[in-house]
């Protein structure tokens, strides 16, 4: 049985507009995923609206620093305020709302 990769989980959550829970740099967080793509020198990253963890607001998470990632049953209907589907931080976008 193939283990689902973190990028696959993130892509599915973006497509279904589902909140994900993750641990990032030791802190548990809940986020609404918006964009998965490559930033800087080719690091895979997630742009998300954080709703629990270390406050709320836009965060950029490097996928290599994420652990314990799961998609929840909680959904969301629309992008968070300030969402830019063409975020210039990304050199290549894999999936977005």
Image (cartoon, rainbow, N blue to C red):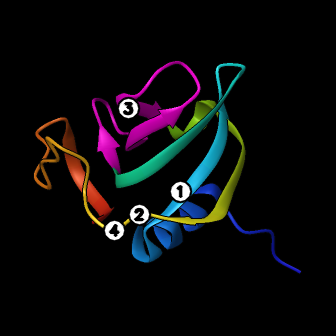
Q: Position of residue 60 (x, y in %)?
A: 38, 32
Q: Is residue 51 left or right of residue 36?
A: right
Residue at image mark 1: 19
Task: Provide the secondary structure element on which disc 3 rests.
Answer: strand
Q: Is residue 31 left or right of residue 21?
A: left
Q: Which residues are magenta?
A: 37-61
Q: Give the Cα separation between the discs numbered 1 and 4.
A: 11 Å
Residue at image mark 4: 77
Query: Disc 2 vs disc 3: which is toward the camera?
Result: 2
**Answer yes or no: do the residues labelled 2 and 4 have beta carbons within 8 Å?**
yes
Residue in the image at 44% along x and 51% along y? 32
Residue in the image at 10% along x and 52% along y? 86
1 or 2: tag closer to the N-terminus? 1
User: In the image, is residue 20 above or below residue 9?
Assistant: above
**What numbered label is drawn on residue 60?**
3
Assign the N terminus to one quadrant of the image: bottom right
Task: Provide the secondary structure element on which disc 2 rests.
Answer: loop
2 or 3: tag closer to the N-terminus? 3
Q: Give the Cα separation between the discs numbered 1 and 3.
A: 15 Å
């Amino acid at each position: 049985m193939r283990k689902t990769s973190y990028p696959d989980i993130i892509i599915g959550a973006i497509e279904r507009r589902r909140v994900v829970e993750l641990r990032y740099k030791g802190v548990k967080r809940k986020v609404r995923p918006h964009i998965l793509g490559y930033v800087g020198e080719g690091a895979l990253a997630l742009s998300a609206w954080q709703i629990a963890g270390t406050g709320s607001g836009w965060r950029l998470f490097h996928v290599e620093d994420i652990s314990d990632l799961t998609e929840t049953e909680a959904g969301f209907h629309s992008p968070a305020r300030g969402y830019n589907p063409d975020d210039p931080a990304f050199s290549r976008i894999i999936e977005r709302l």
